[in-house]
Image (cartoon, rainbow, N blue to C red):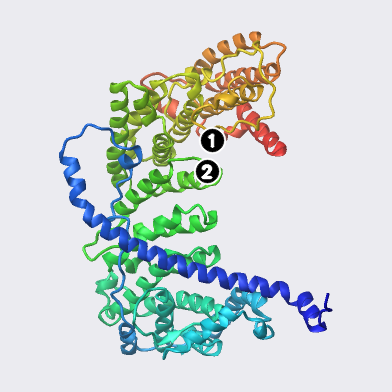
Amino acid sequence: MAKLKKATVKFQKNKLKNTIERRKKHTKFKQQVNRRKERRSRNQENGKADAKDENAIEATETTGSDEQANVEDYFCNFMIGGEESLDLSDDEEDDVNGLDEVEAAEPEDEPMIEEDKKEEEEEEDDDDDEDDEDDEDDDMLSEEDEEEDEEMKDDNSQVVTMELLSNWTESAKKKSPEAFKELLIAFRSIARSDEETDMEFKYKVNNHKVYKKLVRVTLKSAYPIFSEHLFFTKKAKHPAKTKNWRRLEKVVRLFLNNCVRFLRDMDQDEMLQYILTHLEPCSLYFGCFPKTAREYLRVLLDRWSDASLSSESRARCYQCIKQFATAAIDVEKNSYISHCLKGVYLVFAKHATKMTESTLPMIQQMLEEGPDLYTLDQKVSAQHAQVYIHQLASHLKTAKKQHTAESFKSVYTWQFVSCLDFWANVIANTCNPETGVVSPMLTHLKPLVDLSLQTLRLNPVGQFLPLRVHIIRSLIGIIDGTGYYIPMGPFIFEIFNGDVKSKMEQTDLPAFEWDMYLKTPKEYTLTKIYQDAKYQVFYDSLVDFYACLGLNIAFPELAIPVLSKLKEDHKNLKGTRFSKSLRTLIDKLETHKNYIEQKRAPVEYTSTKLDEVNAFLRNTDFETTPFGNFLVNKAKMNSSVA
């Protein structure tokens, strides 16, 4: 075997790792561009196919067929004019000439400029660490990269160098319209570089480091410059009414169009979060361009429901949706909140069709963030709730009427249960009694509770116990959020029947995850693992249910039936592994029952003195009560075990 040269050994030792990483990043970047091209062409083909099939679809609908629609189709008729992406090709490089008609702003104070320099240095630290050896390793570039560079030299576009970009950056910090004009032209070239078009661009970018810095500088400079010239007055409270709007309208449209293009297929979490963070203040300008606004919302919803992105990126997408819903207002003073509410719910319903280890975190995050959007305008939210809760009720009514195994399957799905959970969270978020305001959503509390209870009773067999556990948890969440009493005791006691004398199989199966199932797998049915899981979820649900009622003046009366049933079960469970924890729960409930009786003894309350009832223990922290302290200790024990 030939001996390696010293230069080769030195390279392998000092530079090989960084070179491989850099090539991987370059390859990933090229793959991203190719994916964007494929998706763009696929969307165009889908759009043509949809147009051809419209007549066939209408003909099918008019035949009056009674066949039951697929559950996914039932919920997921999206509202933004089809799911194909809109064509945002109505901008040209000449559009930025409007910046020539506005005057440069006065230079900022030195301290502000110094702060910007420090922020820029911090942002570029990571890039510098990755690319500090670029110049030394130029001779190690692959032949493929060199061929690409030669191909790009054939056009007349000017290459954006780091020196040129640094000059633009310094001028953009001083809010220079001329520098921002060049930044926008270069930004447009990279945003549209994957499009199959014959148009020539003024600039092109060959270096990945320049590429990232150009995006960051353009996004960071946009809102300060726009807000400097599109300022509001007493008479002009909309961007389109401001003094310089006629000059800058096409500039703003070009910037927003290319930002949306850039976001469509961005799969780098760090860059995506940076773009959305600096684009969020520009949400108010989307209201002036309905076409761009619809596409922006569609892209945000697509990114928000992308399981491949990190939870931080999805959270940032949701914040942008929330900002867009309130800030984007068209010339007729109509907001996009109705579109956002529809989009958030329907996109959630579309993706909540299957629960796996990879999709579960995303679905849970959407369940937390989506209902929060419905707190922005509760009057509009109530209108949406009426439509969609009625839709779920109609679906359940059809299943009950047919009363067949197939009809039950159409209801006992992840999509139906997740939608119930979604609206339960909406009710819990919007009907909080501590606000002191009666929410319009309160009118949908009873229909939703009735719908959930009917779903529980639809097919009460042991195999669908996980589904009933999901609905029980949703109803407990409603009780906790609204303070309204729902009699959940009988349903909770159905979870664990206390039969531990029958022999259970010892298996090596993993612990049973209630979040992953609606129907119990056969391999778990007669196992000790499943029995332990049933007892634990029964115990936790009972504790959570009575914790919601812990400060209620009627707690002693509400606790009497459950104490009687628990004592009866404790006798049957003596000598088992469940006996000790059940005895502890009985003692804590009795202690808390006595505590409430002592606190309410001096209170005069009757049917005509409800103010005394409502004010009972209003200022008491639940964690200081006997049952609250028990919950705190229980949570600490669970966290230490985990």
Estimate the x, y position of residue 70 in percent, counting from the top left. 32, 38
Q: Is residue 115 above or below residue 338?
A: below
Q: Is residue 579 above or below residue 136?
A: above
Q: Residue at x 82, y 83 (%)?
A: 6
Q: Position of residue 456 (x, y in %)?
A: 42, 23
Q: Nearer the viewer, residue 89 or 498?
A: 89
Residue denoted by label 2: 360
Where residue 26 sits, quadrant-wise, is: bottom right
Give the residue at x 54% y 53%: 311
User: Residue 515 bears which disc, if any?
Assistant: 1
Of callouts 2 and 1, which one flags the residue occurring earlier in the amino acid sequence? 2
Q: Would residue 105 be visible to someone looking at this image?
A: no
Q: Quadrant of the N terminus?
A: bottom right
Q: Is residue 604 visible?
A: yes
- Please state the horizontal and vertical placement of residue 497, each as a whole percent of the image: 56, 14
Q: Secondary structure at mark 1?
A: helix
Measured in 3D between alpha carbons, the distance from the residue under mark 2 to the one under mark 1, in whole angstroms, is: 8 Å
User: For mark 2, does the 10 Å Cα neighbourhood hold few (<14), some (14 to 19), or many (20 or more) residues?
Assistant: some
Query: Residue 86: which quarter of the image?
Result: bottom left
Q: Residues within 10 Å of mark 1 (few under 14, many from 20)?
A: some
Element type where label 2 sits in the image: helix
Placement of the C terminus among the 4 image quadrants? top right
Amino acid on which the number 1 mark rests in the picture: Asp
Say which of 48 and 80 sits in front.
Answer: 48
**Mark 2 in CB contact with mark 1 (< 8 angstroms):** yes
Q: Nearer the viewer, residue 233 or 135?
A: 135
- Give the amino acid at mark 2: Leu
Q: Give the label on residue 601, or none.
A: none
Please give the name of the residue rendered at 34% of the width and 66% of the height, measured from the top-left corner. Answer: 284
Task: Answer with left or right where residue 9 lies relative to residue 440.
Answer: right
**Residue 11 image offset from top left, x and y in percent:** 76, 79
